[in-house]
Image (spheres, helix red, strand yellow):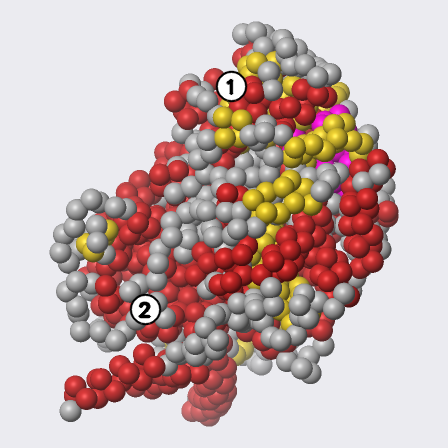
Amino acid sequence: MEKLLNLVISGAVAGAIYSIMASGLVLTYQTSGIFNFAHAAVAFSTAFLFFELNQPTADGGLGWPIVPAALVSILVFAPLLGLLLDRLLLRRLSAAPVYARIVGTIGLLVALPAAALFLVETLCNKVLDLGLPTPQPGFLPPGLGPDPSEVVWRPVTGVAINSDQLAVFAAAAAAAVLLWVVMRRTRIGLEMRAGVDRRELAGLRGVNAARTSAVAWTLTMVLAGLGGVLIAPLQGLFDVTYTFVVLGSLAAVVLAGFRSIPLAFAGGLLLGIVQNLAFGYAPDFLTDISGFLSAIPFILTVLLLILMGRDRSRAAGSMSEEAPPEDHRAGLPTWRRLLPWAIAVGALVVFELWFASDFWAFLVAKGLVLGIVFLSFVVITGIGGMVSLSQATFVTASAFMVGFLVNHEWGFSLPVVMHGGRTSFLVAVIAGTVLAALMGALIAIPVRRLGALALALATLSMAFVAELTVFQLDDVRNGSRGWAVPPIDLTTFETSIPLGPFDFTKSRHMAMLALLCFGVITLLIYNLRRSPTGRAMLAVRSSEVAARTAGITPGRAKITLYAFSAAIAGFGGALLAVVNSPVNDKTTPALIGLIWLAVTVTFGIRRPGGALLAGLAFAAFTDVLKTITGWAFMPTWAEELTASPRLAAVLFGLGAINLAKNPDGVLALAGMQRLEKRRKREQAAREREIARELEIARELEPEAPPVVTVEAPVGAGVTAPSPDGAFGPDGTTPTALRFEGIVAGYGEVRVLHGVDLVVPRARVVTLLGANGAGKSTLCAVAAGILAPLHGRVVLDGTDVTAEPPFRRARRGLLLAPEARGIFPSLTVDENLQMLLRSSDERERAYSRFPLLAERRRQPAGLLSGGEQQMLALVSSLVRPPDVFIGDEPSLGLAPLAAEQVFQALDELRQLGTSLLLVEEKAREALALADIVAVMELGRIVWTGTQEEADADRLASSYLGVEV
Amino acid sequence: MMTAAAVALAFAISGAGASAPAAGGGSTRGVTDDSIKVGGLLQNAFFMGADVGAEARFKIENDKGGVFGRQIDFIGVRDDGGDNAQDAAEGRALVQEDEVFAVVPVITPALSAGDFFLQNKTPFFGWGIAAGFCDNPAGFGFSGCLTPPDPKVAGGAWGEMIKQALGGSARGKTAAVISEDNDSGEVGHKVIAASAKAAGFRVVYSKNPVPPPPAAAPDPTPFANDILTSNRGEAPDVVFVVTSFSNVTLLQNKLLELGYDGVLTNAVGYDPRIASQFVGSSVYIQFNAYESVDEGNTNMQEIIDNIRAVDADIPLTQPLLSGYLSADIFVKALKATGKNLTAERFLATANKMKYSYKDVTSPIKYPRAHSLGGQCGTLVESDGANYTIRVPYKCYKPVKITG
């Protein structure tokens, strides 16, 4: 019993390490929608800075006492780092597709610690000879507590909690409480959560996304930094250790559903307890499985993800979140596309066979083999849009299989497949490939229903499990020496394939073989893309729901793709076994899969050419740099700088960060410039065309004023509007909202062709028109979601054309968008809080709609359509905006609900709000309108008062023919 | 027509890259009439300073006119970053790019280039802490092969020295041995347990549950408690902590926090830069301690002087000494080979050599040392700032591993 208590208490305290990291991960996800793989990197970098500041001067550090060192690193450096990252990377990423977000933060995970270490080890110490301290093995740096740590609590015999452990626990608990308060009880927390729930709507409701983003990242970075400094004395200051701790805490994150910080805290403690219980009570057979107990956090993560990670997001009715980025080579003939590659490959072949020294020949061969491995990324991520982080596992497994088969003495000999009692290399390669494919399929089966992020995390955790358990087994990895795989010697085949003089013990021939295989696999990939499976996969990637309705089984497509990708990785791994011989479990560890991904993304993950470049770059980068910096005229410090293996990690990580959004990587940058120039030219031509058209329009209709006549309460008459648009044509009626010559569209498609419209103060303008006329586009322009190509939007006399949505919202312009202006994940009450800050106001809202009062704690997404719309409107009834724009407010509602909506709009009008209503339900909208405008194909074709509106005219507009 | 073209192409391809055979019937890469090119391979982060040690040793010979008139051209070391694949790449570069005759010193746990060195007849010398030193006819550790994969014998040194530290008798004394949860840990605890048993201790705990780096166990309490109750509910007299660096510190600290007052011993904590972290433990090192100069060890003094001639401030660490000794054994092998220096002759000579450095490191004999490590050792202790010698340097006999 005592033992149990010991394990539970000590485990709970120790689990605080997991808690603090898990809380940080949840916080980041909650406030930005990004899962920050680089959390460990930030923690490490902050702790590293603290170490440099705090170490005594005798050892080379700055000798600062704990408090100032901690303040600078945790409260200055970490937030600044957060702001920098926010500006450079994260803001761009939060609107990017999921896989780009994953890859971008992985790039950061690769680059940041490498940069910190490069800075100190190479730049400061080697080149500048500053003698800064670097963490020594076995050295546990001090944290925020006394050093050496003291025992502060002995709750029972057998448990001693020291000051460092207590510090972590206290910090984790305090952080959990504080963050819960901030997220759930403060304005900024509400705004952050709203921004993650529905980004655009949050802007429309006055949330400055840039500011909340900056606050969010600052908070998470401070938490990461605090965690980093606190766990250094408990784990040592090594970047890989930090990565393992943070990834180990994933189980707690998953348990918390990626949402709840208190649950993440509790989950971390629970994880610590479970680990301790496992260590304390594991039966012997489990301890005999080498590495099993160490892998427990990752095993738990995998299980929890499979159980809880199903993609439950509402996919139906949503458009694809991912439009493929432009292909800058679109429109070029095939030979034009292939020619540069043919030339480059030809040059490479010539170099390899005749000019390269043995050393460079080997590097090229290695690069080409790696290129084959990287092709697996092209398949799984480039085509499938999934981020798989277990490629290194397939490579290792295949390499082990090859190593085992090629070395094993069978005691008999079959012709063709064996030679001299051992398996022939060809058969071994096939076996390795098949094994990898099977593993890929096996992995894909449980994870195929997971969302993109969960898939990435699950595959990474599985890779760790494999590395810590299966690949540790002596029989699998052949001890520390590993498997020696001799260079391929095809001449020892008994049946000679006519490749007689080729001797693959020479790197050059190996390189040619690799190139050939690369070409074959590339052809296979092209065929895949055009095959039904490939098209199915692209369909699934665009919209899984739509794919299902078309009869495609997403699961099967994913498994096939995964198996194919794994097979490629396995094939590459088999060849890599020759290159890397001898191979053991440390030759291609799980984490290198992340670096591979970063490199491939840098060079282009969508195209096989990118994989080829990536492989060559990864293999030869350091040596190319060494050669360049070794030239006579180069200063010695250049050579010292580039000798560090960390430099490659920094550059490839940065590459991944920058190019996460661009699936063509560096390859695209060259073409991008051309594309940009072309686009600018086209843009200029368009604008000239627009100006011309407007002029012509004006010339053709000199009599008819371009603006609508207004039934003004103070006399009537048609005169020119005041220049600032604040007053209507008669010079005295104030204008709430005015559109002047709006030309707008999406990409190449122009939707609005010069719209002029005035919404007078306290009046209702109803905009009617058929589908596709451009009504919603006009609303988007009004609110600031869409920038017009030409024209002005004037709000209450002020030109707001350049202002972002949140500023217009704060000026009093409220857009109720088409898809219900509510935040589905926030409760009803929280939705109201977005616009009604005081509880009095909210009570008034509840008394106006008692139905909402009953549901005030429910997530708004659970309300019915009508209830949601009322929720969206009721805030305006309590605090009427200046201008209310309703984009199809009755869309999809039952008649009774729609009636309620129009009643509310009428009320709104009586409260003095100016309304612009876009509607298809003409009858009710007409009843409400003061002014009616009819839009057809992006132009206002008719305006008039309600009485003047003619049913026939409207009908022909809708039907497109004369009635 | 086609056949002729194919044949021509084939010849062209197979002809490309053929290297000229060495003149004189032996590989003389890196050897000229007046120089021998040598480069090293290190995990720089953990074994910094080894290159300085080697440099100091080579300088002695160079100042005397070289070995048979050849200066030792030490081009420095390449850093493998502790990464196996990187190690293979750097090793290959040393041979093909730098074109060294031999690789000295080689001090990295990630040694993977050993097979390549062997295939390319490149002798390599270093500290046998990696498996790549074992059973490789081209690899020579100055203390032999320290990590044989399936050992039948263990070094008796550690057990014996602890016995002496406890007054000379292990009768009635108990010992616990703990190592890491991987297969080197699996071998490790068995080997050390055999050593302790041979010295007369009753081994009450011998397991390897500790998660090895980079996996981390946030809490060493379960292991500590298991150890503290392993002697029929009581603590053992000695705990052998046979883990990697960080885990040594974590485990020992936890044992001390929980009130352990027996002997804590490990094999890593001898480093003046972190002496403060290893107070209260006895450290087993495989060679003699620098501090032996206080007892009049002239050979060690000579080594220190030679090092100081090259670098006046460098802290005196194990990597530094191992670099020096790697260079030392290499030089001795060079001298034994004679003026006619080719890789084949050198390897043949080295594989018959005896090496020792009196009062500094274990005497070993090749080729047996390809599968066996040196048997001498010293026991030191830290007082927080400095180390003192607890049990002086001595050589012991190997013991059988039973059960």
Q: Residue at x 65, y 19 (%)?
A: B238
Label placed on residue B181:
none
A856 lies above or below B349: above
Q: Quadrant of residue A461?
A: top left
The chain under label 1 reads: A
Q: CA distance from mark 2 to mark 1?
A: 52 Å
Magenta highlight range? B266-282
Residue at the location (65% across, 45% down)? B356
Is residue A919 shown to the viewer in this render? no
Q: Amino acid at mark 1?
A: Gly
Q: Which mark's residue is nearer the viewer, 2 or 1?
A: 2
Tag 1, which secondary structure? helix
- State the image coordinates of residue A254 (x, y, percent, origin top left): 47, 36
Identify residue for label 1: A280
Residue at horizontal 74%, vertical 45%?
B317
Tell me the number on the disc at residue A504. 2
Q: Secondary structure at mark 2?
A: loop
Q: Is residue B267 magenta?
A: yes
Left/right placement of residue B378 relative to residue A465 reads right
How many numbered marks appear?
2
Placement of the N terminus of chain A among the 4 image quadrants: top right
Question: In the rendered view, would you say B255 is above or below B246?
Answer: above
Q: Position of residue A368 (x, y in %)?
A: 38, 69
Q: Is residue A212 left or right of residue B87?
A: right
* Few, some or many residues within 10 Å of mark 2 (<14, 14–19, 20+): some
Q: What residue is rendered at 71% in x and 67% in y?
A: B66
Q: Nearer the viewer, residue B311 or A188?
A: B311
Check disc 1: other Cα within 10 Å, few if <14, some if 14-19, many if 20+: some
Q: Quadrant of the C terminus of chain A?
A: bottom left
Type of residue at label 2?
Phe
Q: Where residue B65 sits: x, y (%)?
A: 74, 68
- Observer able to see residue B175: yes
